[in-house]
Image: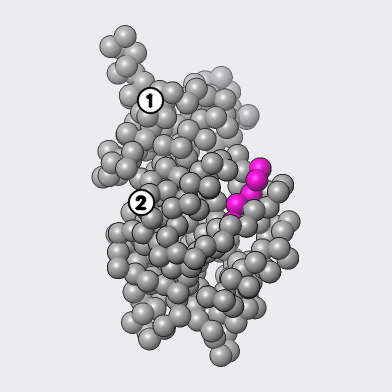
Amino acid sequence: MLTLFILVNIFAAFHAYKFTHFTDTKAPKTDPRKLSFAGKMKTICFGVDNPRPVNKRTPAQPFETIQLQSHERIECWYIKTPQPKGTVIIFHGYSGQKSSMLDKSDEFLGMGYNTLLVDFMGSGGSGGDQTTIGYKEAKDVKVAYDHLQRTGEQNIYLFGTSQGAAAVLKAMHDYPISPKAIIIECPFATLYQAAAARFRAVGVPVFPLTSFLVFWGGVENGFWGFAHKPVEYARSVKVPALLFYGEEDERVTRQEIDDVFKNLGGKKQLVTFKEAGHVNYLRRYRNEWHTATSRFLMTN
């Protein structure tokens, strides 16, 4: 039993490191369906390679590249529109990058808002190779917010999807920032639940592997993983909030969303998409997303 316990911890430590650290951008993403038996055993023991996210395109509009200092150097794209109503700071999800958020940026630009697209640490043009699923990324949120404040912008809005939503909620909890409003998509309730969902998705027993993964993920990255709870951070949000969710989301349950929504402390609205999963809602529900977002921004 002791030997098994030690082995499970070793395997969990490897998996946690791969989950929170990106590999060389040239390394292919591990596809379990294409692995040999030896390859599958190696993946089971040592984790899945996760290539570093790269920006595959740039904005169609004129833009400014901005470098800011957080835990790492973070890169942002600043896009202006004539006579702006304010600026929306946009934060991507896990294993994403700012270029994947250009369609959202275009929507906000069309509504009359400047946009500031941010690469979290470890992604795109930012420094490092680490991701903490929204924990340390909360400082990236604050740094971007502070930068806009220094420019004199008074109408600042925060937008985050998945990990980006978790980072926005944690930033609201940890720092004295007060945007005009926030828009968040499919935030997980706790890091434990987010990790458990990934195990369920591949048919692996949730207990006790999830606990080992969360423990080692936190230890290796300098925080207590079991305390990473966006559902609790939501209690610190006193500004208007718009929450989006896909009813077929395989990563985040409806109960998690209901708990996050209940804890939001200010004026709030929940909009769900009946047949959407943990995906970009603009692909199928662009009109519904645009209508809800534009109305929310007009009244806040």
The region drawn magenta spans 244-248
As drawn, the residue found furthest toward the top would be 1
Which residue is pictured at 53% across the width and 79% down the height?
A: 114
Image spot of residue 248 (x, y percent): 66, 43
- Quadrant placement of the N terminus: top left
Q: Name the magenta segment's main secondary structure.
A: strand
Q: Is residue 197 above or below residue 129?
A: above
Report the Cα–Cα distance between label 1 and label 2: 23 Å
Image spot of residue 260 (x, y percent): 47, 50
Give the left or right position of residue 223, taking residue 16 as reference: left
As drawn, the residue found furthest toward the bottom would be 83
User: Can you identify the residue that label 2 sits on?
Assistant: 135
Task: Say the numbered circle drawn on residue 11.
Answer: 1
Task: Say the numbered circle drawn on residue 78.
Answer: none
Residue type, mark 1 in image: Phe
Which residue is pictured at 45% across the width and 80% down the height?
A: 155
Image spot of residue 24 (x, y percent): 44, 47
